[in-house]
Image (cartoon, rainbow, N blue to C red):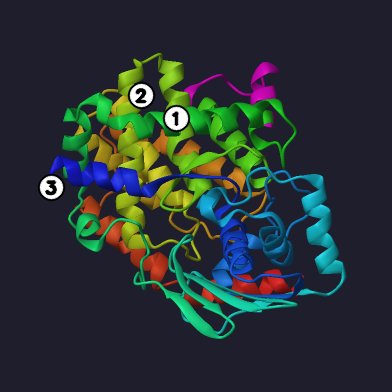
Amino acid sequence: MEKHKILAIIEKELVIALGCTEPVAIALAAATAKSNAKGEIKEICVKASGNVIKNAKSVGIPGMTSTGLDFAAAIGAVAGDPSRQLEVLSGLTFDDEQSALKLIEEGKVTSGQADTPKILYIEVTLQTDKQSSKVVISDNHTNISLIEVDGRVVYQGGCENIGFQSDEEELTSLTIDEIYEWVTNVDISSLSLVKKSIELNRVIGIEGLSGDYGLKVGKTLKENVKKGILSNDIATAAMALAAAGSDARMAGSTLPVMANTGSGNQGIAVTLPVVAVAEKLQVSEEKMIRAVALSHLMTIHIKSKFGRLSALCGVTAAGMGASGAIVFLLDGGLHQIKAAIQNTIGNVSGMICDGAKAGCAMKVSTCSNVAVQSALLALNNQEIKSTDGFIHDDVEKSIESFCKLGNEGTRHTDELILRLMMEK
């Protein structure tokens, strides 16, 4: 693969996002619908696929105290700027929240599950006293595939089934071998976006460690290091910083993050365990940037087969990328990087996704710990054998098996999880 193609993948799949991407995507659809319909809002109807509902139901929205599909749509319609894409909810105020809540209290906002086979689907119909509009987002959190105004199609996107910003040829030709070769040889000046991901995500990690967000997973780990209950080692450092970033993000922090393949939480889990280990080891900035680039690209590679949303937790894929990057920081070679990925697949592959929420920080912490553990085993030339489970001799085949599990083996699980969540 030519170098510029891998760089293009980085530039397309690393995107700055504010807030969890599912409620943000609902807000983007609603903001777009309102921008196409003049007048006072009389009714907003949201329909979304089960996976979107699962991740938008409980998670915090930046700077707001309210949550849920109805609120995401209402706040997007009232105050969202659709031109800002995944930063559509930047600069929200208390008055904006009250205006959105008023629409909900007046019964003007409804939501439900869409009848669609698509994993990622959002449909917002908005009625004002003058016009009506309909916006559909499908397959990708920013992929607006349809805009209707007064029943007339004014825009129809040509990106049907686009799971990723990169084209299919770019992604299918990617391999762990090629990623490693490119990352170790590319001019460091080409990795400015990776450096930006470190800077942005580290800020929200530090914010989570210092503030009282969500379950305070990261902060609790850090406090227990100070008490002498936990050791101040690379595993605890990786868990604390990464979990703290997730704590803040899931609780509605107004800080932006660099998302990886459409997920801000995944962007945190890809970068912060690697950053924490790099800082503990006191490696050079260049080595840290290359390691984080490796983590980003390996996760993108895995997620290209895994899909945007699944019944399995996407942070597991981030843990696989992070494990290989930690091997790189500890001067391991390509074979050991592959072994670390194999070990991680064999450990966390069954972790389910039960929606975006404060508890996601615990899963980020778990996968960060596994990333370190898998890396250390690989550096000691210990690797899960191909006789065990669905692990193959070839890491690429193990990745394919893991992704088949996520895509094909958990469809009924996904439906059951959503039903259990909605029955509460």
According to the image, label 1 marks what residue? 198
Q: Foreground residue, 405 or 162?
A: 162
Instruction: Give the vertical position of 289 relative to 64 (above or below).
Output: above
Q: Which residues are magenta?
A: 220-234
Mark 1 or mark 3, which has the lower sequence index? 3
Left or right of residue 40, residue 271 in this image: left
**Element at badge 3?**
loop
Left or right of residue 345, residue 362 in this image: right
Amino acid type for the residue under numbered disc 1:
Ile
Amino acid type for the residue under numbered disc 2:
Met
Left or right of residue 393, residue 104 in this image: right
Q: Foreground residue, 151 or 92?
A: 151
How crowded is the residue under tag 3: few (<14 C-alpha within 10 Å), some, or many (20+)?
Answer: few
**Element at badge 2?**
helix
Q: Which residue is at the far left?
A: 2
How many labels, in total?
3
* Residue 73 point in image, percent of width and height: 68, 64
Query: Is label 1 in contact with label 2 (beta carbons under 8 Å)?
Result: yes
According to the image, label 2 marks what residue? 288
The Cα atoms of the two marked residues, 1 and 2, are separated by: 9 Å
Mark 1 or mark 2, which has the lower sequence index? 1
